[in-house]
Amino acid sequence: MIYYSEGGPERDLKKDEIRTALKNALGRFADRKRVLILPPDITRAHSGAGMITELLWQQLGEKVRDILPALGTHVPMEKGEISRMFGNVPHSLFREHRWRTDIEEIGRIPSSFVSQATGGRLDFDYPVQVNRLLASGGHDLIISVGQVVPHEVTGMANFNKNVFVGCGGSEAINKSHFIGATHGIENILGTTDNPVRAVLNRASELTAGRLPLLYLLTVVSPDREGILRIRGLYAGDDIGCFTQASALSREVNFTTLPARLNKVVVWLDPEEFKSTWLGNKSIYRTRMAIADEGELVVLAPGVKSFGEDPAIDKLIRKYGYRTTPEILALVEKNNDLKENLSAAAHLIHGSPENRFRVTYAAGHLTREEVESVGYSFGDINELMKRYDPAGLMTGFHTTPDGEGFYFISNPATGLWKAAR
């Protein structure tokens, strides 16, 4: 059921309007006494979820017993990040999602379903896993908060992904990512009807009645001055709110360019992007807009590692961003990749497939490190002078010496593709 639905390409939902919307939606749950909130982490700071979580805490008060950021495999949030994102919400309410250990399995999706969903490409079964707080924490309301936006694994981010992947265990995370990778990132980006979403929707069906979920979904896009605005807010307990949010996201987060681009420059905010695991949104979200033999320049002053997790970082360094056939062959031959399919999927997603060149200007990685994983090295200081992000807005630009390029100020806010 949909409890609230408001949005449009030109809407700009302000804090007071959102506060009222939350109050109306929560009125249906006035009898609930133990509330768990699942917001995204700092890597989705632009989602509006931090403000919404603070408003929920202000309205629900002591009913909010726990707040569990849906980290997936990301590093835990630091206290300063919690304060920046969630305002005055007490730090004592926040819990760390330990995706390797704090997990409860509440069902399995049979291999026959996965095989059918993937067109026979994969035939493993799929675990429906969540953090123990969701399954056995004694909460009578679980509020999942987040942004719907194009996503490289699930097509469109959020909804039940926030629950079964963001708060899931290692096996579920590994398999969901690998299902998406084998389907093909350019086939999955921006879609809601795909193998990964089919599996997650089946997980929702299997857990209906056990997890008392309320979804609060935002749609966010920049205005003409590059300032992010909340264009939509949708509340509900089933796929209806996600379907509506996805429709608006396609309107405001998709940019279709007239032709493929020879040079794309992407800025990665150092406060948000500290690994290629996160920073490769610069590749995911632009790959369908880059011409054959074109170049993507990634300005990444905050990037200091490849993986968010030490084990995954080690695998990225070992195998590098190779083509899809190469990675699939390596998975077959190497147990360390076979046991970490999300890492294998990431290597596929981050590969330019020998079609275009990626110049990575990472602030804390050496030339040797960058080149060892298959990218070209870029000097961050030189490239920051040539493509100064402080003076650029998303769109077409020309350098003083006549080089044309397309600049993107935050790849996490959309999807860029060429009409031809």
Image: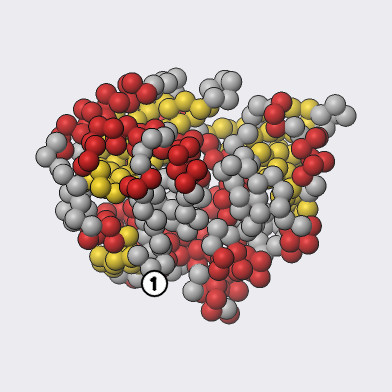
Q: Quadrant of residue 367?
A: bottom right
- Tell me residue 407's x, y (percent): 68, 33
* Element on which disc 1 rests: loop
Q: Is residue 348 above or below residue 13?
A: below
Residue type of the residue flagged with mark 1: Phe
For the N terminus, the quadrant is top left
Q: Nearer the viewer, residue 350 or 162?
A: 162
100 or 33: nearer the viewer: 33
In the image, is 342 to the left or to the right of 268?
A: left
Q: In this rendering, does residue 3 appear at all?
A: no
What colour scheme does the image use?
A: secondary structure
Label 1: few (<14), some (14–19) or many (≥20) C-alpha neighbours in 10 Å: some
Q: Residue at the right extreme? A: 401
Residue visible at 50% across and 63% down?
A: 342
Q: Which residue is mark 1?
A: 124
Task: Report the quarter where the C terminus lies.
Answer: top right
Q: Which residue is at a point 82% across and 32% down the rendered structure image? A: 403
Q: Residue furthest left?
A: 31
Residue 197 in the image: state x and y as whole percent.
38, 52
